[in-house]
Every structure is written in C-alpha cells, then in structure tokens.
Amino acid sequence: MSQITVTFSPWEYELGFQVGIRRYTANWDTKDAAHYDRALMEEDRKASVSSALCELAVAKHLNQYWHASIWCAAAHKKHRNPPDVGTNVEVRRLRTAPGVAVRQTDAGRTVWAARIDDPEFRSCLLLGSVDANYALKAGIHVPGKDYVLVPTDELDPPE
C-alpha cells in the first residue's frame, strides 16, 4: 500500500496543537459519544491534537481549505454538516483500527485515513482515501455499529 508522509512546519505544528487543545477544552466536561469505548481510547488531549493534525495534513496534501473550527458539544448540531477539509473531505484519524470507519453521514464525500506516525507529532502518515458512496455499499458492516469499515489495504493510495 502506498502512503505519504506529510511533515509539518513549525507554524503548522503550533496551529494543529492550538486547535486540538482548544477543541479539548471547549468540551472539557462532555460525555463520550455512544460509539466510543473509553477502555480503548487514549487521553482526550492527545486524541484532540492528533485529530486536528490529521485534518491539517490532509488539507495540506490536497491543497484545500481547512476551517480549523472549534465549538463546544452544545453547538455540535449547528456545525455537524461542514466537512473537515475543502467542500467534501472527511478525515478519520486511525490509531489502532485496521481500517477507516465510513458512516451514512459521509455519503457524497471522500473519507481520508491518517495516522500520526511520529512521537513528537511532527509528521502525519496519509494512508489513503475512499469514496463514501462506494464504501457504504462495499464496506464491511460492523455488527451493532452505525458504520462500515474499509480496511486500510483497500483504500485508494494518496496521490
């Protein structure tokens, strides 16, 4: 599988951390989503920063707009529709999963899988992407979950 490493400049690194920490503090006392399993999760502050950096890496690679938005859980319904990057890109940060989750709400978009591959968070590995409409038909349905799983080796390689 072809992968691409995106390396952050110091200002990108700082911005990704700032957005991640601000997302974390905006949701300081928020309960986890129903599909989260706390036993399998890492610390929220680390996960928030990693997710923000993955979004930034995909935007940088695609040369598309990243809104870097921050809102509290109470405003989530108001802001849930805009994509993470550009006009139709969702970014999923992978840590231990064997593939990328694609949800019904991703229909009409491209879903990218990314992983922070550096303990200092200075780079991000882009694993590939998948057309959500295709994935929703061909992906592996996960019993009891609201998504399909597309194994990383079945993703379209980053170009």
Image: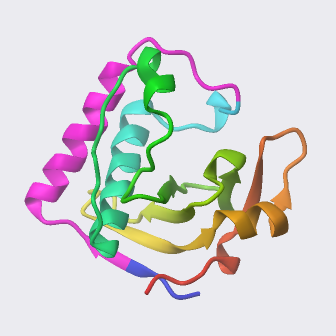
Depth check: give the residue in front, 94 or 147.
Answer: 147
The residue that appears at 83% across and 65% down in the rendered structure is 137
Q: Residue furthest right?
A: 143
Q: Is residue 108 left or right of residue 4?
A: right
Extent of the magenta region: 5-34
Position of residue 130 relative to residue 146, above or below, is below
Depth check: give the residue in front, 2 or 136.
Answer: 136
Residue 26: image quadrant is top left
Position of residue 21 relative to residue 86, above or below, is above
Residue 54: image quadrant is bottom left
Q: Is residue 110 left or right of residue 142?
A: left
Q: Which x, y percent locates residue 30?
A: 48, 15
Depth check: give the residue in front, 137 or 158.
Answer: 137
The residue that appears at 27% across and 33% down in the rendered structure is 21
The residue that appears at 38% across and 16% down in the rendered structure is 28
Q: Is residue 92 left or right of residue 159?
A: right
The residue that appears at 29% across and 54% down in the rendered structure is 66
Q: Please tell me whether residue 126 belongs to the stretch shown in magenta.
A: no
Q: Residue furthest top?
A: 29
Q: Is residue 146 left or right of residue 47?
A: right
Q: Which x, y percent locates residue 103?
A: 69, 49
In the picture, the quarter occupied by the N terminus is: bottom right
Position of residue 97 relative to residue 126, above or below, is above
Q: Which x, y percent locates residue 2?
A: 52, 88
In the picture, the quarter occupied by the C terminus is: bottom left
Q: Which x, y percent locates residue 139?
A: 80, 65
Numbered circles on residues, count: 0
